[in-house]
Image (cartoon, rainbow, N blue to C red):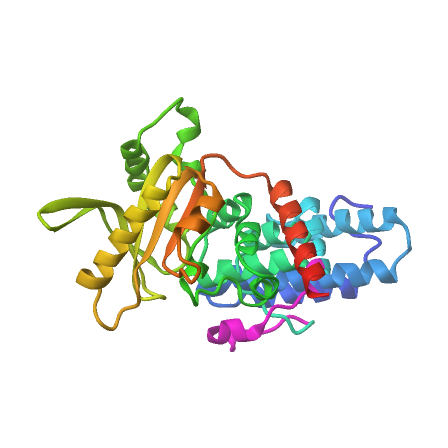
Amino acid sequence: MGKNEISSINPKFLENISEVLVQARKNAKTAVNLSMVYAYYEIGRMIVEEEQRGEQRAAYGTQLLKELSTYLTKNYGKGFSVANLKNVRQFYKVYSKDQIGETVFSQFENLPTVSSGRKVYLRWSHYLKLMRIDHIDERHFYEIESIKNDWSLSELKRQYNTSLYERLALSTDKDRIYRLAIEGQTIETPKDAVKDPYVLEFLGLKELPEYSESELESRIIDHLQQFLLELGTGFAFIGRQVRFTFDEEHFMVDLVFYNRILRCFVLFDLKIGELKHQDIGQMQMYVHYYDRKVKLSDENPTIGIVLCRDKNNAVVEMTLPEDNTQIFASKYETVLPSKEALQKLLEEQLSDENENTM
């Protein structure tokens, strides 16, 4: 067999794959990345079907990918190594049986569909990450959030590594956990906009033996874009150390944001130690001032979040009224949380809820 000859692959199989690639490369430059994802899906399907028609031996599949890699590289250039063809095959296997709610993305209703009827919305690099997430609901969540928030690959990886799905799931009930896999994160109430804990590993504080509240605040400002990503959808920065005065006394709010979805101010008070009930009382005063003196009549009530290194939930519950919807206390972490530990907590929470509904 000559150096560039392909001996054992069905010529029609090669012709079909060539047609997919030629068609993909004819599309407009602005859609090249998406077009190639569609092409990879179809190539993955063809590889799987060809393997199913061939000999039921692992050696056949290995040889098929080697010879296909040689053929495609010769005719279409780089990007068709055996390793990448394995990814293409796995992409089809994962997403041929994987659907997400089309109603979430009505703006993409005119996109074409792959052979199984599914649409794809992201770059190939995103799907390389997503298809390695085993839990289907979690995979759906990160795909939906990547699309809704236009996450870059690095942002997707960061949100996954900080266990965003588990953190949101732990702060809600069973019905809303299921909604995460269908709609992504939805913000309808103040509680929906609050995380516990917040993960601030990007501040580099774990390397410091000790630090002050002003140092914590300064580092947040220095990494404001990453902090906004951690806060989630709809937040805009207003200011730091925002001063207000009444009864001839001056007060400073550490960080002030506005959430355009909830249409309200969100105040942060930073604490580097354990939360005290006086901290909650102080935040209540801040929130009352903003509600009475700052917010407009058509805006919603202000949200106050005390961000602390540690807290006693019993103290929080006893300090706040039972019908509280405005004041929250959340911990912050300076290192990435253990994904396994959070998953275990989530499983226990779902188990407890199931028992309570029986």
Relative placement, left or right, of 345 versus 67 is left
Q: Residue furthest right?
A: 56
Residue 299 is left or right of residue 148, and the answer is left
160 relative to 1 in the view: left or right = left
Say which of 281 and 98 sits in front: 281
Asked whether the viewer can see residue 74, the reply is no
Kindly identify the residue that appears in the image at 50 percent across and 50 percent down: 156
Q: Which residues are magenta?
A: 94-115
Q: Residue 132's spot in the image, x, y percent?
A: 65, 49
Q: Is residue 35 visible?
A: yes
Q: Residue at x 48, y 46 (%)?
A: 314
When the figure is inspected, residue 297 is found, relative to residue 329, above or below; the finding is: below
Magenta run includes residue 112 = yes
- 332 in magenta: no
- 197 or 201: nearer the eye? 197
Residue 20 placement: quadrant:
bottom right
- Tell me residue 147's x, y (percent): 49, 62
Q: How many marks?
A: 0
The answer to whether residue 218 is above or below residue 269 is above
Q: Can you give x and y, in whole percent of width and height, for residue 224 in the image?
A: 32, 45
The residue nearer to you, when weighing 154 against 254, is 254
Residue 305 position in % (x across, y down): 36, 50
Most extreme residue toward the front, as rendered?
Answer: 318
The C terminus - image quarter? bottom right
Rendered residue at 52%/54% (across/down): 171
